[in-house]
Image (tube, coloured by chain):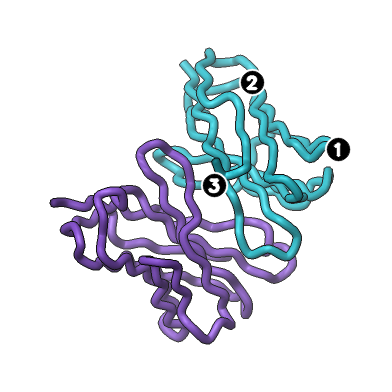
Chain colours: A purple, B cyan
């Protein structure tokens, strides 16, 4: 079974500062994918970034980067230069690639990020 | 606009009733996934369809059923509704071989 753990229910960060949202995972799959999604108060799920388990480089997408440490089974999201619009719920998720696990995303419980002036 | 369309956006209904949630996937995506987001259970995978056929099943109650039609749109049917079924229901779609899912804006179901 796959499990995603997000230990930070809530985080505060000042505008223009960087923030790291923690995510650890557990899986017996050799090949898997890790995702981060943003859910603003309006409710939609917005894809931010993806990291494959065999990708050698950490993924980056604009101000988002994923700090992937395979041995530690962690996939932390780093947001640089925080903006007020970054205030939202952030979910870490995983998908396995083996038969039977490739279809679903397993989500963590989320971290609510609040950006302050 | 993500390209995945879910209707209706909001739904209020009474216990014991039946409702149908509709999802149109992003153009070209053959896979459709349904998820339920509730306060007590978080985001739960319900079911996946691929090109009209059921591909995987998650924590979907027997009172719930889904299907994907030849035009690839999907419907999630919820029957004998209970207060605990109140949740945000998401549909997502993906393309074959893709690593990503695109989510719709969700249907917020309130059972009273």
Q: Which residue is label 2 attached to?
A: B19
Q: Chain of mark 1?
A: B
Q: Earlier in the sequence, mark 3 or mark 2?
A: 2
* Quarter residue B2 falls in: top right
Mark 1 or mark 3, whichever is nearer to me:
1
The spot of residue B50 in percent (x, y) is: 78, 50
Q: Is residue B51 visible?
A: yes
Q: Is residue A3 visible?
A: no
Question: Dot 2 lies on which element?
Answer: strand
* Residue B10 vs residue A85, the one in the foreground: A85
Q: Are marks 3 and 2 in contact (CB under 8 Å)?
A: no
The spot of residue B74 in percent (x, y) is: 73, 36
Question: Dot 3 lies on which element?
Answer: strand
* Residue B10 vs residue A4, the one in the foreground: B10
Q: Chain of mark 3?
A: B
Residue B70, label in figure: 1
What's the residue at 59%, 64% (across, down)?
A95
The spot of residue A117 in percent (x, y) is: 13, 51
In the depicted structure, whether residue B73 falls above or below residue B20: below
Q: Which residue is label 3 attached to?
A: B44
* Residue A16 vs residue B57, the one in the foreground: A16
Question: Dot 1 lies on which element?
Answer: loop
Q: Are marks 1 and 2 in contact (CB under 8 Å)?
A: no
What's the residue at 63%, 77% (across, down)?
A31
Where does the N terminus of chain B fall, quadrant-wise? Answer: top right
In the image: residue B49, left or right of residue A7: right
- Evaluate whether label 1 is on the same chain as label 2: yes
In the depicted structure, whether residue A31 falls above or below residue A106: below
Neighbour tally class for label 2: few under 14, some 14-19, many 20 plus, Cα within 10 Å: some
Residue B28, label in figure: none
């Amino acid at each position: 079974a796959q499990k995603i753990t997000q230990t930070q229910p809530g985080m505060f960060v000042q505008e223009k500062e960087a923030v790291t949202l923690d995510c650890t995972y557990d899986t017996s799959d050799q090949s898997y994918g890790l995702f981060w999604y943003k859910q603003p108060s309006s409710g939609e799920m917005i894809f931010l970034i993806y990291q494959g388990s065999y990708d050698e480089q950490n993924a980056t997408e604009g101000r988002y980067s994923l700090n992937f440490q395979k041995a530690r089974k962690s996939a932390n999201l780093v947001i640089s230069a925080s903006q007020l619009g970054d205030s939202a719920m952030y979910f870490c998720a995983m998908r396995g690639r083996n038969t039977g696990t490739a279809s679903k995303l397993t989500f963590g419980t989320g971290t609510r990020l609040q950006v302050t002036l | 606009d993500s390209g995945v369309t879910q209707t209706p956006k909001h739904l209020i209904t009474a216990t014991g009733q039946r409702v149908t949630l509709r999802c149109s996937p992003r153009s070209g995506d053959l896979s459709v996934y349904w998820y339920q987001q509730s306060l007590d259970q978080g985001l739960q995978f319900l079911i996946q369809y691929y090109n009209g056929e059921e591909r995987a099943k998650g924590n979907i109650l027997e009172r719930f059923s889904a299907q994907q039609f030849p035009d690839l749109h999907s419907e999630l049917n919820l029957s004998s509704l209970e207060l605990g079924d109140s949740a945000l229901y998401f549909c997502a779609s993906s393309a074959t071989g893709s690593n990503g899912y695109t989510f719709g804006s969700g249907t917020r179901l309130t059972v009273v």
